[in-house]
Amino acid sequence: MKFFVDTADVDAIAELNDLGMVDGVTTNPSLIMKSGRDIREVTKQICGMIDGPVSAETVALDSDGMIAEGRELAKISDNIAIKVPLTWDGLKACRVLSGEGRMVNVTLCFSANQALLAAKAGATFISPFIGRLDDLNLDGMEVIGDIRTIYDNYGFETQILAASIRTANHMKEAALIGADVATAPPAVIQAMVSHALTDKGLDAFLKDWEKTGQKIL
Ligand code: E4P
């Protein structure tokens, strides 16, 4: 499973990228606002840091506006994936932009039916939002599983990009169920390393090592 980082924080991206943990980046208007930076400036910097897709989101509501904004965002770098919302206009924009050979990430997906439409419209990525479904006591991971089955049934090449990931457990579940990509905040990716038994075991080893009085260096 590929890891995308869901942030516009360049320091956090750099830290994970140094460890080989970054296959791509996703941003959205809220993350750009959080960064406090200009969308073109910060997106260009991120695109220069990594080789993989960097999602930048349109904000128009009509397809013509989304297409114009998408083309503008794509000028930032060759590795831009244009993000459009899962509306009828978003699907129209997806069809046009993907027909121009551009990467398109269809976002704000909450059902398998929506994902089926996005694949038919030629999406490169479909972004089902797990956490926001879980917030409503719905099963976000079940939606990912349904999309996996449908895409496999018909050989759709659209990549399932599990989004709105809130916990390390979401990462494991997304990997088990067959998501192609998971995008998560840096803190969630870092949390995947934690295990109480690792900490406990390390502590015990270090205490015993101290008793030996030896040194390695
Ligand atoms: C990614 O593309 C999405 O914008 C993001 O995962 C949304 O996450 P949130 O529901 O935690 O805001």
Image (cartoon, helix red, strand yellow):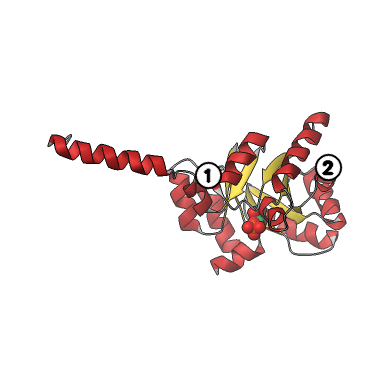
User: Closer to us: mark 1 or mark 2?
Assistant: 2
Whole-percent x and y of residue 193? 45, 43
Q: Residue 39 sits in which quadrant? A: bottom right
Q: Residue 36 sits in which quadrant? A: bottom right
Kindly identify the amino acid type of the residue bearing the numbered disc 2.
Answer: Leu
* Residue 22 numbered mark, or none: 1
Whole-percent x and y of residue 151? 79, 35
Classify mark 1: residues with Cα within 10 Å, few (<14), some (14-19) or many (20+). many
Picture residue at 58% right of the left edge, 43% below the top: 171
- The total of numbered circles placed on residues is 2
Residue 75: in sight, yes or no? no
**Most foreground residue, 119 or 139:** 139
**Most foreground residue, 101 or 123:** 123
Picture residue at 20% right of the left edge, 36% below the top: 209
Q: Is residue 206 left or right of residue 114?
A: left
Which type of secondary structure does the marked residue at label 1 adopt?
A: loop
Q: With respect to residue 1, does 30 lie above or below?
A: below
Residue 80: in sight, yes or no? yes
Picture residue at 47% right of the left edge, 48% below the top: 190
Q: Residue 86 sits in which quadrant? A: bottom right
Q: Is residue 26 left or right of residue 189?
A: right
Q: Is residue 57 left or right of residue 199?
A: right
- Whether residues under marks 1 and 2 lie with C-beta atoms below 8 angstroms apart, the answer is no
Q: Which residue ends up furthest to the left in the rendered image?
A: 213
Where does label 2 land, which residue? 116
Screen quadrant of the N terminus: top right
